[in-house]
């Protein structure tokens, strides 16, 4: 373990070989952090969290990282991220599982192997994400939502509590239901990103017509470029257009 002299690690926590801690990291009672793992500055890891156990893939070894057996590709957590009690983040199998900076993972969150979570993401209590899920920046996922493996959630989207996310959610969408359906745009998130009301209405109309917008404001261009690069395989269908 490197960087531990500047961290506050509870004596009942287990911090294994191959773990690199940034400055002012807090790790709570009975937490387990296994390598390879890199945790950024000012992170807070709550009691009973388990970070870095092997991916749940039957064809891969279940290594004993607590004994220094580092067989997988690790976990990376960005600066100032909070991981609340009893949450679990698995090692990556093809790439490190990544949680971005300035995120909030509330209690009992599960992030499976190879997941990629952007910056400033809020994941509410009880959310479960399958393997290879990709989440853009500034996403908000409501309590007890379940995200199917390999799904993509675009930047600025809001997913309602209890949703079963079986399709890919486009940028700045507001989506909820079981299975999840598109219910307009995350207008609050767009306004916070500096988008004007005309652009909010235009994107809302595009989603209602089962299409991506023909043009987007400059301050949303990066979000839609990210969405295209993620190559969503099962884009979400708006509920209004299915009625």
Image (tube, rainbow, N blue to C red):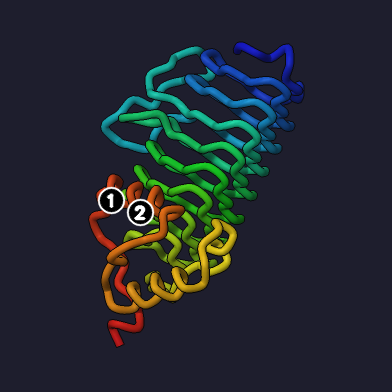
Occupied quadrant, residue 181 = bottom left
Seen at 73% across and 12% down, the residue is 5
Quadrant in which the N terminus appears = top right
Q: Mark 2 Cα within 10 Å, few/some/many (few <14, many 20+)? A: some
The reply, left or right, for residue 177 in relation to residue 84 is left
> According to the image, label 2 marks what residue?
224
Occupied quadrant, residue 218 = bottom left
Seen at 45% across and 62% down, the residue is 172
The reply, left or right, for residue 6 in relation to residue 107 is right
Check disc 1 and report its element: helix, strand or loop.
Answer: helix
Quadrant in which the C terminus appears = bottom left
The answer to whether mark 1 and mark 2 are in CB contact below 8 A is yes
Residue 229 visible to an observer of this rendering = yes
The reply, left or right, for residue 169 in relation to residue 99 is left
> Is 206 placed above or below 138 here?
below
Query: Residue 126's x, y, as percent?
Result: 57, 55
> Is 3 placed above or below 224 here?
above
Query: Residue 207's x, y, as percent?
Result: 34, 73
Residue 176 visible to an observer of this rendering = no
Seen at 68% across and 14% down, the residue is 4
Query: Residue 204's x, y, as percent?
Result: 41, 74
Q: Nearer the viewer, residue 229 or 130?
A: 229
> Is 174 placed above or below 156 here?
below
Check disc 2 and report its element: helix, strand or loop.
Answer: helix
> Is 152 placed above or below 174 here?
above
> According to the image, label 1 marks what residue?
228
Labelled disc at residue 13: none
């Amino acid at each position: 373990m490197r960087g531990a002299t500047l961290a506050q690690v509870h004596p009942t926590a287990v911090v294994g070989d191959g773990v690199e801690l940034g400055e002012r990291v807090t790790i709570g009672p009975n937490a387990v952090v296994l390598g390879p793992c890199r945790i950024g500055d000012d992170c807070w890891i709550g009691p009973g969290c388990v970070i870095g156990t092997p991916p749940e893939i039957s064809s891969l070894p279940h290594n004993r990282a607590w004994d220094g057996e580092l067989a997988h590709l690790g976990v990376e957590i960005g600066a100032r991220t909070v991981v609340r009690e009893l949450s679990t983040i698995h090692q990556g199998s093809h790439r490190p599982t990544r949680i971005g900076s300035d995120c909030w993972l509330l209690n009992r969150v599960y992030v499976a192997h190879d997941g990629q979570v952007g910056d400033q993401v809020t994941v509410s209590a009880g959310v479960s994400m399958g393997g290879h899920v990709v989440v853009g920046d500034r996403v908000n996922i409501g309590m007890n939502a379940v995200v199917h493996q390999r799904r993509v959630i675009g930047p600025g989207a809001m997913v309602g509590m209890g949703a079963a996310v079986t399709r890919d959610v486009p940028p700045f969408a507001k989506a909820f239901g079981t299975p999840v359906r598109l219910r307009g745009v995350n207008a609050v998130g767009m306004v916070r990103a500096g988008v004007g009301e005309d652009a909010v209405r235009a994107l809302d109309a595009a989603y209602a017509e089962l299409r991506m917008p023909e043009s987007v404001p400059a301050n949303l261009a990066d979000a839609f470029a990210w969405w295209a690069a993620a190559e969503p395989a099962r884009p979400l269908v708006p509920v209004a257009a299915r009625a």
